[in-house]
Amino acid sequence: MRAPATRARYSGVAIALHWAIAVLIFAGFPLGLYMHDLPLSPLKLRLFSYHKWIGITVLGLVLARLLWRLGHRPPPEVPMPAWQARAAAGAHVLLYVLMFAVPLSGWLMSSALGFKVVWLGVLPLPDLVGKDKALGDTLKVVHEILSKAMMAVVLLHLLAALEHQFKRRDGLIDRMLPSFGKDPT
């Protein structure tokens, strides 16, 4: 039997930001894996540009989400053991850190390797560091490690949400699903 869904939901803005960021992360990660080993070509350069656009957009949306969260309390947590609540809180903090660190490390890497970041092909962003190949190579490794760590945390987040939805049936996931104008109860 399913527990009744809680009436408490995230705001529409928080929900929209959550899903926009999720879609971009799920697009950016496989794109990064795919383009990495391509031979130098116009396609590879175009894909790198798309990957950078996704990363900078994620960075901006995560900043907006964090600012929104500071002014808007999330709904109360569903009942769960204290260790699970601590693990969930820790995973959320780690996810926020990684959602900032991954795009920033990519931007730093591009700057160090001498590749300009031009958001959406129209807005040139400032270089964060001077050109330095050794630093760029180090930042490339950092970016790859952070990206893989973020995907691991995202996967754990997804698995936990699915566990709440299909095993516990506690309505937790309903708090972040768009209601599309329907009564969320």
Image: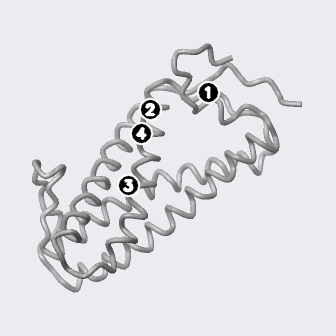
Q: How is the image coloured?
A: one colour
Labels 4 and 3: the sequence-earlier one:
4
Q: Amino acid at mark 4?
A: Leu
Residue 154 position in % (x across, y down)? 55, 56
- The residue pinned by badge 3 equals 100
Which is more N-terminal, label 3 or label 2? 2
Please tell me how crowded label 4 is: few (under 14), some (14-19), or many (20+) other residues with Cα within 10 Å: some
Does label 4 or label 1 sit earlier along the sequence? 4
Three-letter amino acid code of the residue under disc 3: Phe
Alpha carbon distance from label 2 to label 4: 13 Å
**Mark 2 vs 1, N-terminal side:** 2
Locate residue 34, reporting x and y percent.
Answer: 37, 71
Answer with mark 2 or mark 4, whichever residue precedes in sequence. Answer: 2
Above or below, 176 relative to 185: below
- Tell me the quadrant of the picture where the N terminus can be found: top right
Which residue was labeled with disc 4? 66
| Amino acid at pointer 2 | Ala
Residue hosting label 1 = 75
The residue lying at 74 percent from left, 25 percent from top is 5
For the residue labelled by badge 4, is the local secondary structure a helix, a strand or a loop? Answer: helix
Q: Residue at x 52, y 21 (%)?
A: 180
Instruction: Using the numbered discs, state the Cα–Cα distance from disc 4 to disc 3 in whole angstroms.
Output: 11 Å
Q: Residue at x 38, y 35 (%)?
A: 67
Q: How far apart are the alpha carbons under marks 2 and 3?
A: 18 Å
Residue 94 vs residue 85: left or right?
Answer: left
Q: Residue furthest right?
A: 1
